[in-house]
Amino acid sequence: MRGKGFGFVLVLLVAGYALAGFLPGAAMAADETIKIGAVLPLSKATFSQAGEEQRRGLLMALAEINQGGGVLRKKVELLIEDDTGEPSVGIGAAEKLLTRDKVAALIGGYSSTITFAQMNAIQRLEPVVAWTGASSTKVEHEFGPKRWFFHYHPWDYHRQSTIRNFLMGISPRPKNIAIAYEDGIYGTTSRDYVVKYLKETGFNIVFDERFKSGSSDFTPMLTKIKKANPDVFYWVAYAGDTTLIMKQAKEIDFNPKLFLSVAINFPQYKESLGDTGNNVAGVDVWIPALKNPETVNWLKKFNHAYPGRTPEYWAPLAYTNMMTVVDAIKRAGSTDKDKLISALEKTSYDSPFGKITFKKSEEGGIHQAIDEQIITQWQKGSAQIVWPPKKATSKLIYPTPDWKNR
């Protein structure tokens, strides 16, 4: 794949070497580097914020690795392709990295829909895949049992069971829930789990509809939800959708007792929403407010590499992704596929998310890294952890004030 995606590869390689303190002036022979390939969404507005965060985390890890002497006495070369938010492009990018560039491992990833298409296309190669993206269990059921497939991000049921447990713990407990979800397999699978979990525990679903991700107007949907008068409005979407949903909810004076989503801690959240973004809660994997030693140390590195930025969890996740793969290559003493897979299976790495090991998941996966989630809420312009209690940095604001009283 040349054109835009190929251009991103060249730019990001130069950026990676610059961060690492290397100049790409002299061409290196193939056996002087270890190539790792990543596929990220970098140009589709709905996905690109997460893709750019992953890129930052990967380049940060690349700099650290190469400044430390690389691995197996070789520099690590990171090739990044843009999937443009399209399954067909994502397939081409993955196949190019594996067959033309001969990368030792394929990392990165984001959309469940694109991931499912990519893995279907490349499974004949049985490559080493260490994947940060995709939460849909459709991906887990199909590829989770494959020994070559390693997965970092929690699956849908991890997220939706967290939503259920959180809502059950609110006092006074909400009763009526409105649910909206993006129309890809990410949203659809998330919806199936959360509806099942909430109905089983006595919640009343008063609205349950999907929407087109990337739409320019959510007002008709929000107007219908407002009429349903839910205690909680919960939606599954990407960052760009969330920004517009909140702006248009305020425009029509829709104010349930709690706005609850999944994509609320992206870097542009505060800048794009201002006070409109306050009191919104979301389920997440990590935020900078976590005060474990690994998070504190990682944030120092991130702030040095990217001064003034507040990272979203995709940045430390991508950093962890890269570091664990390179660590496995080091322990394997080789990029041989079987040896690398065996080394990845023995991973034990202290990350901003805690100890990373690969274990069996609930629905067939054999290499799952992260399964714990937190609930956060924006309060006075900063993201706070409000659940579980053992990790909380603030109390949940519930019910939230009306727009006129904020």
Image (cartoon, rainbow, N blue to C red):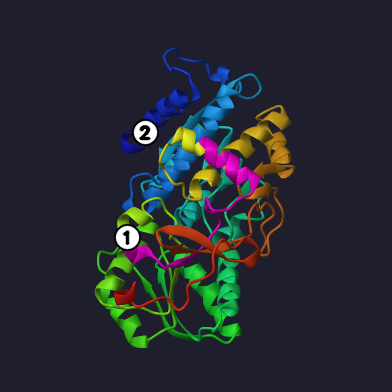
Which of pointers 2 and 1 indicates the residue nearer the eye? 1
In the rendered structure, the answer to whether residue 300 lies left or right of residue 264 reads right
Q: Amino acid at mark 1?
A: Leu
Q: Is residue 102 visible?
A: no
Earlier along the polypeptide chain: callout 2 or callout 1?
A: 2
Identify the residue at the far top of this view. 26
Instruction: Verify CB contact (< 8 Å) between mark 2 and mark 1.
Output: no
Tell me if residue 21 comes above or below residue 365 in the rendering: above
Q: Position of residue 381 (x, y in %)?
A: 40, 59
Q: Amino acid at mark 2?
A: Phe
Tell me if residue 255 comes above or below residue 330 in the rendering: below
Q: Quadrant of residue 233?
A: bottom left
Work out which quarter of the rendered image holds the N terminus and state it. top left
Is residue 146 shown in magenta? Answer: no
Question: What segment is highlighted magenta in the picture?
Answer: 274-301
Q: Kindly state the secondary structure of the residue where label 1 is placed.
A: helix
Q: Residue at x 51, y 50 (%)?
A: 313
**In the rendering, which numbered label is found on residue 26?**
none
Front residue of this view, candidates 61 and 397: 397
Residue that carries the numbered disc 2 in the rendered image: 6
In the rendered structure, the answer to whether residue 2 lies left or right of residue 185 reads left
Q: Position of residue 301 (x, y in %)?
A: 53, 35
Front residue of this view, candidates 307 and 29: 307
Q: Residue at x 52, y 55 (%)?
A: 134
Q: Position of residue 169 (x, y in %)?
A: 60, 77
Q: Position of residue 11 (x, y in %)?
A: 37, 29
Tell me if residue 29 comes above or below residue 115 in the rendering: above
Front residue of this view, candidates 380 and 308: 380
In the rendered structure, the answer to whether residue 261 lies left or right of residue 147 reads left
Q: CA distance from mark 2 to mark 1?
A: 34 Å
**In the rendering, which numbered label is found on residue 273?**
1
Mark 2 Cα-neighbour bin, 10 Å: few <14, some 14–19, many ≥20 = some
